[in-house]
Amino acid sequence: MNQNMHQAGVKLLNALSRHADLVMQVYLSGTLDESKFSAKVIDSLIKQGILWRPENDADLRLKNAVRQLLEGSLQDERTRHIDANIGASLASLKTLAQHYKEALQHQRFAESQAHLSDLTEHVYGLTETLSNSVRVLFSRINNEFGYVSSIDAKIRENQLAQSQVSELLDQLEMFKFDELSNIAASHRELRHLLIVTLQHSFSRVTQELSVVQARLLSLLGRFRELRGRTRLLKGFLLHMEQSPDFQPVNYCGLSQVPMLFNQAPGIIAPASPDVKRIEHEAELQKLVSAIRAINRPQKNYQPDRAAHEIVIEEQSAVEFAEDSLKKAVEDYFCRIIDTGERLTALEYYQQQQLEFDPEAWLYQVIGGYQGLTTEEQSYFAIEPSGMPDPVFTGNFVITDVELGLR
Amino acid sequence: MISEQGRILEQLLSGAFICQVSDEDAWRFLKTSGNADKIEVQLNLLNRTLASAADGDVFYAAYQSLGDNERRVLSSQFQEISGHLVPLVEWLLLVQQASGTDIPITQGSAIRLTELQGTIEDTPAFAEQLAKISHYKLFGSTSVSTDGQIKQVFKRLTDLGYMLRPNQDKQIFIATGKVEYLYEVIKFIDETESLSLAQQAQSAVQQGSLI
């Protein structure tokens, strides 16, 4: 028997894992799209009790047990189901405890163990259901019923949650610990399960539920306020549409102006700097240094810089007037060549009665010589005459230059 | 250094609205018992008093006693506020509808401009509505592109103190307490003029004729 159960269970779980895609698709969409999967697979899943058809012409759905398994493990927030059937669970707990005690009395230990493990399973199951219910409620509060969009729907959801909370609280009243402790009597295991574990979970759940209730009430208040505001706004617009020339009475003319409309305008103007305050010196200095002043003096009309008319005309040919001084030097050189005599520059200057500055003449003669090419220079010999400077050593003052042919 | 109290006094006197979004430190300071009294004494010197709106979400300076001059100022201010109501309400509803969450803008709501712009550009009805809103005198946009219009609207809202842009590099805006003040104003008008706006809206929804 046990072996058979094991095999059947493994088979079922295998089927679940093999068709995990299908199961999740049904879980998320609610019903199965039969055209997407083969009829054989669907048939086998129906046989194994994973899918079922609520009515003859209805779509296939997931069995509730499978759905609950998924909801519990995935902590799905969409779940709104709260199992509040605590009375039935408590009754079965009591029955099992009686079985256990009877088995012990008749010294059927193996049977008593089976009953005890069954009882343990039930107790833990009950505590899990309770904490699960609270968790579901909290998750709904925490996202403020985010799964519905309109405020009215949120208010309805809130009311549903509140009724579920009060139902849960009603059911929790069925916990009668004196009765349970009578049943448990002096059995250690029973006391642990029925009193310690259950009481622990009971007190935690009642505590949390009272928090949940308070939160739900405050949320409801908020939703109602939000709804009231929306209605107020819409009503105002509607009113303005229906009577466009509506103008509220000017309440400021009343003897008692409502505080809402008593609003004094600002009277504080920015302060001015006090340059004599020493402690502000650094700040002010910084401000001054940050000033970017660009001094652009106002320029008056400047006719010189004004735009002129540009006249384009042909450029006159430039003639280089031969410098007379240069010409005289050339003549002097030619004279030397012609006569072949040595002649100082100043003697020539006097002979020709030239009118240049004698110093400039001497410079020009020396310059003229230097200006010749090396080959031409070699025909001439130039001999400056003069004396060292009486004051500054290393300077030679030329008084005259003698030129001759080599 | 200027003390916290002095800083807040300065803010109040310059006509600022202090809320948790715009200046959390100052808001907490005013919320702490005793501090408001200290500020009050100093405000009284200048014929001002500390006023709060929207269940203490926003603080601002109000006149302590009203003479003719003060009344004149308040009257013109009221004209301005009541003139702003329609464009602002239309804008609030547009953002609420475009964001698709059905949750109205409240203090601290963050609006991502690029996301909002995307939705509005993709939906011609929203784009039309935005064009209408942005051409109100309050926003004064002359742009024909959605981009220009929405930027101008948000710029004006930031100038008016309804929105805050915490990071200049990012196009994220946060609604300040002044939005709460706006709701308060509408509520007040609703109650004083007994318009029963909420009922109007509800009955219109039931008739299926709303916007």
Image (tube, helix red, strand yellow):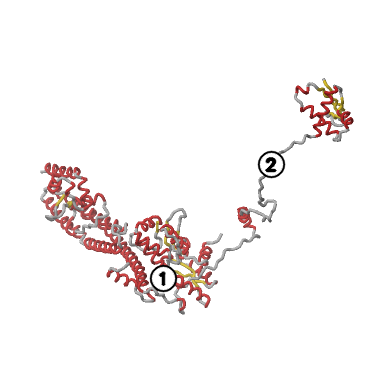
Q: Which mark is residue B185?
A: 1
Of the residues shown, which amino acid type is indicated by label 1? Val
A135 vs B104, nearest the viewer:
B104
Chain at numbered mark 1: B
Secondary structure under the numbered disc 1 in the rendered image: helix
Residue A119 can be seen, yes or no: no
Quarter holding the N terminus of chain A is top left
Mark closer to the observer (2, 1): 2
Q: Which mark is residue A307?
A: none
Q: Residue furthest bottom?
A: A255
What residue is drawn where x is 60% and y is 53%?
Answer: A290
Secondary structure under the numbered disc 2 in the rendered image: loop
- Does A148 appear above or below B196? above
Question: Crowding near pointer 2: few (<14 within 10 Å), some, many (20+)?
Answer: few
What residue is drawn where x is 17% and y is 46%?
Answer: A37
Task: Evaluate if marks 2 and 1 touch, with contact meaning CB atoms under 8 Å apart.
Answer: no
A245 vs A147, nearest the viewer:
A245
Residue B179 location in percent, x, y?
A: 41, 65
Question: Crowding near pointer 1: few (<14 within 10 Å), some, many (20+)?
Answer: some
Instruction: Return the residue at label 2.
Output: A315
Residue A16 can be seen, yes or no: yes
